[in-house]
Amino acid sequence: MKKQLLIGLLCSVALPCMAFDPLFTSKAQPPKGCIDKDIAHDPLSLDDLVQIGVCTNPALSAQYMGVKANEANLGSGRNEYLPTIRLTGNAGISGVRMESHGGYAQTEPYAAKAEAAWLLFDFGGRESRINTLRAYADAANYGYNAALHDLMLSVQTAYLRLLAAQETLVSANASLDSYKQSYTEAQKRYKLGMVSLSDNLQAKTRYEQALLSVVLAEDEIKQFSGQLAILLNLSPDTQLQLKKPVFDQADISIEKDDVQELMKDALANRPELRAQESQERAAKSSVTAAKTGMLPSLSATASADLADTTWKHSSYYGRENVAGLVVSVPLFTGFSNLYRVKSASWAYQQEQANTQNLRLAIQNEVWSNYQHYKTSKRSYEISQTVLESAEENHRVAFRYYQVGKGDIITLLDAVAQLAEARQNKISAFYSLLLSKANLYRSVGK
């Protein structure tokens, strides 16, 4: 049993035992459940992308290491509740040459000393210092949760933008087909002498502009694809296969459609606010710790000495054992304790103001995101009706132009309106999903 205790003590003092946690401060765990998929070929859902991002994002990993460092600091602080034991020893050789008769005397002294000290009472200073470290550890943990939420929102945003870009390309190609159909019809009617050259040129111009829109849409896909890959710690040229939400089947509603309830949820759930409140608690504990620095402390001490100056030539040695209580009273420290208390008090008031400011900012964020969500939802509903009208208008305009009852300007305007309505529906749909994601993030979900 003694041997096992000695091994444990040596690990805690001298060895880098990363998993050894005798004071039980380690709570945060690394991400688990990373998916096993062929990223380059398997279709990936939003949940898949979030899992990959959580497991591979280097910025999030750095945040997690900060959490573990603060937990270790807390463990270091808790050592104040335990005694400290120190063992020292020395040995050497010394010699003296006698000038009077040329003799030489040599001694080989040694000494060993064991010391122990244990802080018994300091008017709550030790507890306040540990509470400060505990609050900092909590703040780091909440900060990690906030970073996790931010990463999830970033992945979701990049995912939806990439899908929107892909849908925009589909829309651009559909518009290109419509313009090509108009251009083909204008060419045919021009060759038959039924319309002027102007009709043909206008149709050709619109067709080439539509072709440019396709090229720009393809470039946008590459940009958003690269951004998503970077978030997943992949090469920007990684080709990702994404599962797409269906327009008519997408969940565009929210659980609570009451902005007051949403603001209450945000104040209760947001990890940023919990982190700031932990910072405030740390500042408050620092005030108490600074005040106790001006008060006495009581410690128990014990020591044992063993020394001999001629251990090879004599059996005589000295031994001294001491045990007692030590009272330390800081009478004058150059006013450093006074200003330390002032500094801690002002820092505490600053953290209180920061907490109140963050509460107001969170409420404003929820309010703004809720209003944006409601607007986006209404815009999406209107865009569906507009698209239906634009499709019917295009069919009528094209039919009229075919039979010679309409002009090219009317037809091209109808095609442009159809292209715009189609794109507006895509933008409104993905803007709605993005606004919903931002609202949930501001609520702390």
Image: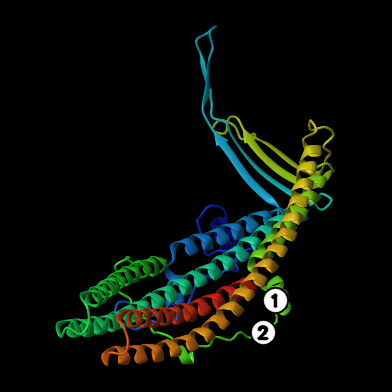
Most distant residue in the left direction: 191
**To which residue does mark 1 refer?**
265
Identify the element where label 2 is drawn. loop
Q: Nearer the viewer, residue 4 or 299?
A: 299
Colour scheme in the image?
A: rainbow
- Marks 1 and 2: CB-CB under 8 Å? yes
Identify the element where label 1 is drawn. helix
Residue 285 seen in render: no
Amino acid under disc 2: Lys
**Residue 52 picture location, percent across and down:** 42, 74
Task: Say which residue appears at 79% left-offset and 33% top-offset.
Answer: 333
Amino acid under disc 1: Asp
Q: Nearer the viewer, residue 347 or 9?
A: 347
The N terminus lies in which quarter of the figure? Answer: bottom right
**Residue 268 picture location, percent across and down:** 71, 73
Q: How far apart in space, not on screen, are marks 1 and 2 (Cα)?
A: 10 Å
Q: Is residue 196 left or right of residue 69?
A: left
**To which residue does mark 2 refer?**
256
- Which of the two labelled residues, at mark 1 and mark 2, occupies the earlier sequence position? 2
Examine the image and state in which quarter residue 358 appears: bottom right
The C terminus lies in which quarter of the figure? Answer: bottom right
Examine the image and state in which quarter residue 296 appears: top right
**Residue 430 picture location, percent across and down:** 47, 78
Residue 136 seen in render: yes
Q: Is residue 319 left or right of residue 295?
A: left
Q: Is residue 171 left or right of residue 46?
A: left
